[in-house]
Amino acid sequence: MQRSQVAAFLLTLILTFVLGACQMPPTDQSELEREETSDEMSEGKAVEREPPPAKRVTLAATGDIMVHSTQIKAARQHDGSYDFNSVFQDIQPYLEAADLTFANLETTFGGSEPYTGYPLFNAPDAMADALKNAGFDIIQTANNHTMDSKAKGAVRTYNVLREKGLSPVGTAATPEDRKPLIVEKNGIKLAFLAYTYGTNGIPVPEDQPYLVNLIDEDVIAQDIQQSKKDGAEFIIVGLHFGNEFDREPNEEQRQLVNRVFEMGADVILGGHPHVLQPMEQMEVGGEKKFVIYSLGNFVSNQFSYTVSNPYANKGVILYLDIEKHAEDETVALKEVRFLPTVVHRYEQNGIGYTILPIEEKHVTSESLPYEYPGLTFNMVREAWEQTTAHMEQYESFPVFHLEEAD
């Protein structure tokens, strides 16, 4: 064979081999490498994908809203009307920082003068307007003053609150109204229930037992179960119990709290002592529970010089962050915070009242964001020190800061 023919033959073989190799399917090794690369990309995407955010609702809870005679006089305007809005002007931003706000109302809206304070409370409807304007949503009406204006007053109080856009809990105007209060907020269904130890000896009519919820453990258990049937995912119970002006819960309070938790309640908000009692978290049946034995007074005319108690004008706003996890839709208490408050009574063109928030920055900088006759920095600092020490007696809880809610 001639050299030129040999060279052509060899060139043909080489080209055939190269082209064939290009068209061959990938080897097992190259396929494996490609699969590994694909898997790594998939895994990378899974890592980068964030889980859906949890749904959250923040509940703010305050103590007793009392309306003594001097408060009524202070709210009276020149034209004979009443206006309580100024009482809440300093604290309002802190109430509005929550999704829902709760308070215990220790007066009635009986509807006719004379308006009275202790011992039989009957306040102008203007207080209901002020509560709504301040940012309140849910009002506990089951307490020892529910019947101060008798059965007619209890019914009217319930109806006035409803007319103002507030949700009463613990009392009812009709048998049909006596049911758990279910509130859905931010995709979470909360149940509110409330009960009182008694009504100061004023009997509840036998033919109207639905007017006010008295503490009856069988009834509480039934109401909790009904709440769950109604779709509640988290249950808050208000208990009006304990001894007035005692700063520590008694054994009866503790035992009742444990039993109500065993029934299925998640949070218990206590009241009646008119002073703060400590709060704590506990585990019951593998679930985290929370109780504050007394929220104290939020506003009243109870001061050291009126009831000989230096703690009656100190209170808190309690902030409960409740979360619903997207993965399994379980609802649980995520965090508890609190804000100390103090009621200041002053004289400026007559007597006035205001509820003052106390943040840590107010007492560390010695610069108060509010100014009233008779108010001193030492008064505010003392309230801060007393309240924070007492509230953290059982365990430590963070103090609320308004900018956190922005």
Image (cartoon, rainbow, N blue to C red):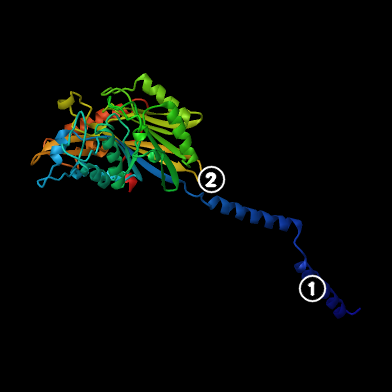
Q: Is residue 54 above or below residue 255?
A: below
- Measured as percent of width and height from the top left, residue 176 is found at 40, 40
Element on which disc 1 rests: helix
Q: Which residue is mark 1?
A: 15
Q: Quadrant of residue 295?
A: top left
User: Quick one: 84 or 226, which is closer to the camera?
Assistant: 226
On-image quarter of the N terminus: bottom right
Residue 54 relative to residue 104: left or right? right
Q: Answer yes or no: is residue 300 visible.
A: yes
- Measured as percent of width and height from the top left, residue 89 is found at 21, 44
- Three-letter code, disc 1: Leu
Residue 225 relative to residue 292: left or right? right
Which is more foreground, mark 1 or mark 2? Answer: 2
Q: Residue furthest top?
A: 251
Residue at 54% of width from left, 43% of height from top?
328
Q: Is residue 97 above or below residue 149?
A: below
Residue 117 relative to residue 296: left or right? left
Q: Is residue 83 above or below residue 263?
A: below
Which circle marks residue 69 in the picture? none
User: Quick one: 348 or 204, which is closer to the camera?
Assistant: 204
- Three-letter code, disc 2: Glu
Label pair 1/2, CB-CB below 8 angstroms: no
Q: Which residue is mark 2?
A: 327
Q: Residue furthest front?
A: 207
User: Quick one: 214 or 296, which is closer to the camera?
Assistant: 214
- Measured as percent of width and height from the top left, residue 38 is found at 64, 56
